[in-house]
Structures are given as C-alpha cells and as structure tokens.
Image (tube, rainbow, N blue to C red):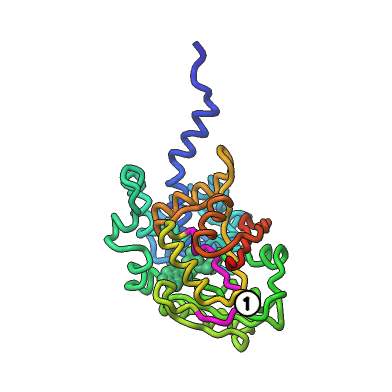
Amino acid sequence: MAGPDQAARATLRRFVNGFQISQAIHVAATLGIADLLADGARPIDELARETETDPEALYRLLRALAAADVFSEEEGRRFALTELGEGLRSDAPGSLAGWAAYIAGPASWQAWGALLHSVRTGENAFRHVHGADAWSWRTERPAESAIFDRAMMTTTRTMNRALVDSYDFGRFGTVVDVGGGNGALLAALLAAYPTLRGVLFDLPHVVAGADDVLRGAGVADRCRVVEGSFFDGGIPEGGDAYVLKAIVHDWEDPESLAILRACRGAMADGAVLLLIERVLGPPNEDLVTKLIDLNMLVHPGGRERTLEEYDSLLEVGGFELVGATSTPAGISVIEAAPSA
Ligand SMILES: C[S@@+](CC[C@H](N)C(=O)[O-])C[C@H]1O[C@@H](n2cnc3c(N)ncnc32)[C@H](O)[C@@H]1O
C-alpha cells in the first residue's frame, strides 16, 4: 500500500502551523522592527535596546522570520530587510504593517480562537469572547480603535489606485462615503478628481482621525465630515453617489438591509449606490475571499456574498443592480440605482 503523499502532508502541516508565522510577524510589526532596519542591517542588541525586548528572545523571533525570508540574518547576529520585510515598513507603499499589527493582535487572536464556537453555534466569536460587538467594544477602547482604523486605512490605500483606474468616480459632483473610516478612500478620490466634493460619514471616534488624512492629501477644503451612525438616520443627504466600501460585508442580512434602506432614505431618486466589496468566487476557488468571510464570521458578524446574493439584498433594500466592475485589487464596484 502506498504511504501518504509527503508533499501533501507537508502542505497540510504548513497550513496547520500557519498561526505561528502570523503571530511572529504580528510581534515584529508591533515592535516596528522593519522601520528600525530601514537604513540597513543592525545587530540584535541594538534592536532589543530600542524595542525594550529581551535580546535572546528577539533573536529567536527574528531568526525564525529570517528562515521564512521576512528578514535576512547576517554575520554576527545582525538582521536586514528582505523584499518581504520591506512590506512591513510603515512608510512602504502598500504597507502591511498596520494590518499585521491588527489581525493577530490579542483582541483578534482571541476572537479567532473561538472560531469553533462560531462554527458550532453560528454566533459571532468576537461577541462571545469579548462580551460586546466589535464596534461598541472598540468605541470604549481608543487605542484598539486606532489600531483597527490604521489597518483599514492602510488596506484601503493599497486599493485606491485600482479603484480610480477601474471606475469613473469623476462623473459625480458629490460622493458620500458611508462608513468611510478616517477618509483614506475619499482622500484618494478627491485627489484624483479636482472638481469632486466629498462627505465623510462614520462614527464620531472614527472621523475624529480624518482631519490629518484629508489635510495630508490636500483635499480637506472639498470634504465635509459628518459623524453619526447609519442605524440612527444620520446619513447626509445631497450626494450624487453613496459609497459603502467594506460595510455591507460586516453585517448579516437584517442589518445590511437597514443600512441600505437608510442610504435609500438619504438619496435622491437620481443618485447612485456603490457597494465596494469582494465578490465571493465559485466552489474550490478564491481562498482570499473565503478566509475574509471567516474573518467576518469571527469579527464583526457579517459575511462575504456572491453577486447574486448582493443582487437579492439590493432588491429587498430598495435598489436595482446596474452592474459590477471588477478591479485588479480583488474588490468590485457594485453599482445600484434606487428602484422605481
Ligand atoms: C470595515 S471598516 C471599512 C472602513 C472604510 N469604508 C474602508 O473601506 O476603509 C467599517 C467601517 O464602518 C464603520 N461603522 C461601523 N458601525 C457604524 C455605524 N453604526 N455607523 C457608521 N459607521 C459605522 C466603522 O467605524 C468602520 O470605519
């Protein structure tokens, strides 16, 4: 009888142990190691001193990550950046530093640790572990909110170019970004289209961080910032396009419908709704979106959807699907118009 396929076993083992590399990268990102190596290789004692860590434990962390090609280990316990590690610099284009700091941080780690609970019960793991939904929990914890908002901002920045290149936002006069975080998408849209105006809408503690982002992009004079909740009727009126980027996937259908209806209530008949989301791929494909879907189950308590599912949701929420434009960033712009 043939023995097990060793290559298949090795792949499976790599998957089973994947949490180790995720946590190791999280620690290196939280300590800012990549930024400390921006000007070249440095000895472990210096890195340990600057990060206030134990030199031997830090060495063991970095040599493991060097074996994974995230850093490179040089003569005399010195470490340097590799191409992979460059992506952990906070100033790198498309930096993953903010995401790595968030996704394997204690709050997220503990929620993912309760995935089995979610699978057994269908319940949201974050709420099970932390006793509150992710949004209320972060509202009470400014430091955690800052980590999450940075992760969102830097992730959004990796997608902005692809969005602007793939979809013509320039045909609108005013874009309202509903749940727009600290303005990373609006800043890019307003920078790309000099006559476009924007309205940023999100929870008060989130838009509090928007000024720096909008000013940094030189677009603050064309953007109004409105704080509120999309469950409390606060969505601003008067936009030509209402963007919901990575919002509907945060919620199950009842809350998603409430958000869609709140947008519809704020929109004039000729305005356009733009859901910017990943579209769930067919069976046996699209691992990235299917893992994000699990992240939605664990974290906010939402789900990724197929285009057909978005179509049905939109219809019930008072909209007609106009079309979906895919982008090289893996997200799509799903355009909908208010139903007649
Ligand atoms: C996944 S993040 C997406 C942020 C941004 N659209 C982006 O793509 O970078 C979800 C956003 O929804 C916001 N949010 C959650 N609950 C909200 C509510 N009740 N009213 C308004 N915004 C809310 C969060 O603060 C967060 O900025």
Please, what is the three-letter code of the amino acid marked with disc 1? Asp
Q: Tell me: residue 21, above or below residue 337.
A: above
Q: Is residue 151 visible?
A: no
Q: Residues within 10 Å of mark 1 (few under 14, many from 20)?
A: some
Queried whether the magenta region covers residue 242, the answer comes back as: yes
Q: Is residue 223 left or right of residue 260?
A: right
Q: Is residue 131 toward the left or the right of residue 240 in the image? A: left
Pick the front one: 152 or 26: 152
| Residue bearing mark 1 | 240
Residue at image point 63% right, 58% down: 332
* Front residue (pair 72, 74): 72
Q: Which residue lies most toward the top here?
A: 1
The residue at 36%/72% (across/down) is 139
Instruction: Report if the beta carbon of the residue with label 1 is closer than 8 angstroms to ligand 1.
Output: no
Magenta run includes residue 333: no
Q: Residue drawn 58% across and 52% down?
A: 307
**Residue at horizontal 27 percent and vertical 61 percent from the top:** 131
| Secondary structure found at label 1 | loop
Task: Give residue 16's position: percent from left, percent from top.
Answer: 44, 38
Q: How many marks?
A: 1
Question: What residue range appears in magenta?
Answer: 236-249
Query: Foreground: 223 or 37?
Result: 223
Is residue 39 shown above or below 10? below
Q: Is residue 132 visible?
A: yes
